[in-house]
Amino acid sequence: LETDCPYLTPHPFRGTINEPKNITYIIESIAKLKNLSKKHASEATFSNACKLFNIDLWNILMELLLLKEKKMNAFYLLL
């Protein structure tokens, strides 16, 4: 999901510039149209985006954890 189009603002904010904070209104609309919970609609669109863009979340999470661990180790070395 995205909110890149500045002139397609969701209903409660029509007439203003669209912003990323409006993504909740987009997911609510999709959930309602598909008769899903917001959680399920969010998970499905996230999963589909990962498949579409060939994103391997497991590897990304592991890299982030390793990066965090390295930063923490560097922080402790400074103490």
Image (cartoon, helix red, strand yellow):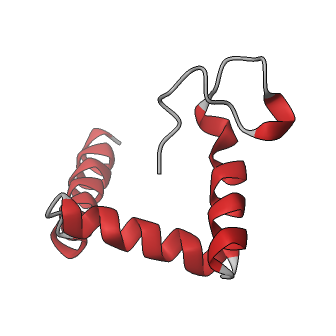
State how many labels appear.
Answer: 0
Identity of the residue furthest to the right in this view = 12
Q: Where is residue 20 in the image (x, y as percent from the top left)?
A: 58, 35
Question: In the rendered view, does 20 fall on the left or right side of 51?
Answer: right
Of 54 and 34, which appears nearest the observer?
34
Q: In this view, does 34 lie above or below 7?
A: below
Of 15 and 39, which appears nearest the observer?
15
Q: Is residue 4 above or below residue 17?
A: below
Q: Can residue 66 be seen in this view?
A: no
Q: Can residue 16 be seen in this view?
A: yes
Q: Where is residue 8 in the image (x, y as percent from the top left)?
A: 61, 29
Q: Is residue 23 above or below residue 41?
A: above
Quarter of the rendering containing residue 59: bottom left
Residue shown at 47% from the left, 30% from the top: 4
Residue shown at 26% from the left, 59% from the top: 64
Q: Assign the C terminus to one quadrant of the image.
A: top left
Residue shown at 22% from the left, 75% from the top: 58
Q: Position of residue 12 (x, y in %)?
A: 85, 37
Identity of the residue furthest to the front in this view = 33
Question: In the rendered view, does 3 fall on the left or right side of 37?
Answer: left
Quarter of the rendering containing residue 9: top right
Question: In the rendered view, does 68 fall on the left or right side of 23?
Answer: left
Of 47 and 58, which appears nearest the observer?
47
Residue shown at 66% from the left, 82% from the top: 36
Q: Where is residue 50 in the image (x, y as percent from the top left)?
A: 26, 65
